Structure formats: structure tokens, C-alpha cells
Image: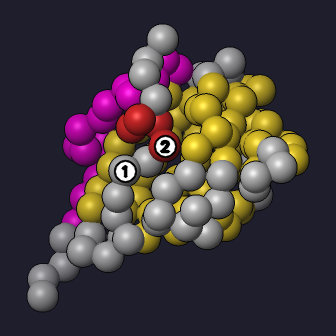
């Protein structure tokens, strides 16, 4: 086993939906993503088998959570722990920066959402 060192500035980014910029780093058992959401960006409600931890660094988002879609307004300092299979979606109320961790690594919800 060898350590790997990265710098976000050198990690390739993608734009899976309009208003979302993402950089991903993969380990064997987890994936971490740096996410920027422009105000108005929507990530449609979805679920995936991986556990997800979302750390809000800046901005404000409306999250729809669980099968009943109850809402939570998240802002800097909030951490959402979403077990695998937990339905969730996001509406970006202010430009926002987040760190998402998925374990095990796998597709994120925006990977199945068409841009536009």
C-alpha cells in the first residue's frame, strides 16, 4: 500500500448538470468530491447504494430528504449523513461549495441526471 497525494487544483473537473462543477478523487473504499453549485442548480431526488456524507462549506441549499421528501435548509457547517438507499435531492439557494464522500465509491445521483 502506498499513499497518494492530490491537490484539488490539479484534479480534472466535470460538469454533469448545468450549474454543478465537480472534482473526484477515488480510493479503494471511498470517493471524495469537491462540489461547486451555482445558485439555482437542482440535483433531482435520487438514491444510490453508497453511503454519502455531504459537508457544506459555504452557501445555502434546500435538501429534500427521505421518501417523504421533507425539507432541510443547509448552510456552512452543516453535515448530512445519508445512508445508502436514502432518497435525497438539492435546490441551490445561494452559490455553494460542498465536499461529498461516498463509500463504497460509486456513481453519484447527478451521473444519471441529464444536463439542461
| Residue 67 vs residue 18, the one in the foreground | 67
Q: CA distance from mark 2 to mark 1?
A: 7 Å
Quadrant of the snapshot with the N terminus: bottom left
Q: Secondary structure at mark 2?
A: helix
The tag on residue 109 is: 2
Q: Residues within 10 Å of mark 2 (few under 14, many from 20)?
A: some
Magenta stretch, residue numbers: 5-19
**Residue 84 among magenta residues:** no
| Residue 107 vs residue 54, the one in the foreground | 107
Q: Secondary structure at mark 1?
A: loop
| Residue 100 vs residue 42, the one in the foreground | 42
The answer, for residue 21, to whether it is visible in the render is: no
Decide if residue 82 is on the left or right side of residue 63. left
Q: Residue furthest top?
A: 116
Q: Residue at x 38, y 71 (%)?
A: 104
Q: Residue at x 86, y 44 (%)?
A: 71
Figure quadrant of residue 102: bottom left
Answer whether labels 2 and 1 touch (C-beta < 8 Å).
yes
User: Could you tell me residue 86's position as x and y percent?
Assistant: 65, 60
Q: Residue at x 63, y 26 (%)?
A: 42
Decide if residue 11 is on the left or right side of residue 92. left
The tag on residue 107 is: 1
Amino acid at each position: 500500500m502506498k499513499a497518494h497525494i492530490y491537490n484539488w487544483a490539479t484534479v480534472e473537473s466535470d460538469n454533469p448538470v448545468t450549474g454543478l462543477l465537480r472534482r473526484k478523487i477515488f480510493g479503494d473504499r471511498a470517493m471524495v468530491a469537491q462540489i461547486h453549485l451555482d445558485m439555482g442548480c437542482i440535483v433531482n431526488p435520487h438514491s444510490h447504494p453508497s453511503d454519502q456524507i455531504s459537508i457544506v462549506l459555504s452557501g445555502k441549499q434546500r435538501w429534500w430528504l427521505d421518501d417523504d421528501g421533507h425539507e432541510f435548509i443547509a448552510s456552512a457547517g452543516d453535515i448530512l449523513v445519508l445512508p445508502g438507499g436514502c432518497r435525497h435531492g438539492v435546490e441551490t439557494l445561494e452559490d455553494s461549495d460542498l465536499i461529498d464522500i461516498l463509500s463504497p465509491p460509486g456513481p453519484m445521483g447527478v451521473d444519471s441526471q441529464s444536463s439542461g
